[in-house]
Image (cartoon, coloured by chain):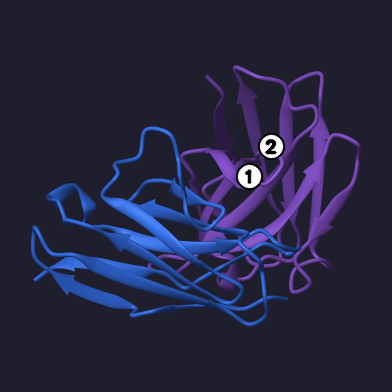
Amino acid sequence: DIQMTQSPSTLSASVGDRVTITCRASQSIGGWLAWYQQKAGKAPNLLIYKASSLESGVSSRFSGSGSGTEFTLTIGCLQPDDFATYYCQQYSTDPRTFGQGTKVEIK
Amino acid sequence: QVQLQESGPGLVKPSETLSLTCTVSGGSINSYRWTWMRQPPGKGLEWIGYIHNSGRTDYSPSLKTRVTMTLDTSKNQVSLKLSSATAADTAVYYCARESNTPGKTIFDYWGQGVLVTVSS
């Protein structure tokens, strides 16, 4: 299985901050990476696919980059609605695997 | 608009079989992979496996001896059975559709999730 490792596990930030989350794959996944946002008690919601493609309807504050084994999710100007947990997920091979999550909390 | 709704017992006794159903509305279940995932309280997401309407299945290696997924096209339902349940199976269970768009085979629709607790 491909292992996905996110860092940091928790990130404390303020409204207006620019934040970056890193996701590393245990082997190359090309660009087959997605990012999801999950709020408490809700299902995950797709933000980014193919490493850098913004899902329709998602704010342009969110951007993704990377390829191979290293990827980043950047939130350009943190808004109150952005405090949540973020997961990366590879869809290069089965089984699909997720990172352990990064919780973005209010500083 | 495609909608997914999980249903099933919220409490399962240890050693019994956990059974859940995902009902799909607003779209066909044909030509997609239907995936089950779970999330233990306070933890991350775990992929359990998928079933395709062709009958193809693939299960997580760590769960494959206990997992069975079936699909009922007449009812637009996908089912999950997990046998020999233990407390470690306590989690919110999600069903999700995997998109069949080339290059974008991500989970585009999710159910709201159902909490299943394994306890006597």
Instruction: Report if the CB atoms under discs 2 and 1 are less than 8 Å apart.
Output: yes
Q: Which mark is residue A8?
A: none
- Name which residue lies at 66% across and 37% down: B21
Q: CA distance from mark 2 to mark 1?
A: 5 Å
Q: Which mark is residue B101?
A: 2
Which chain hosts label 1? B
The residue at which mark 1 appears reads as B104
Q: Quick one: B17 or A62, which is closer to the camera?
A: A62
Three-letter amino acid code of the residue under disc 2? Thr
Would residue B55 be found to the left or right of residue B95 on screen?
A: right
Spot the purple chain and give its letter. Answer: B
The picture places residue A5, in percent across and down from the top left corner, at 50, 79
Q: Is residue B116 above or below residue B31?
A: below
Label 2: how many residues lie within 10 Å, few (<14), some (14-19) or many (20+)?
few
Three-letter amino acid code of the residue under disc 1? Lys
What shade does chain A have?
A: blue
The picture places residue A85, in percent across and down from the top left corner, at 33, 61
Label 1: how many residues lie within 10 Å, few (<14), some (14-19) or many (20+)?
some
The picture places residue A45, in percent across and down from the top left corner, at 43, 45
- Name which residue lies at 81% across and 28% down: B72
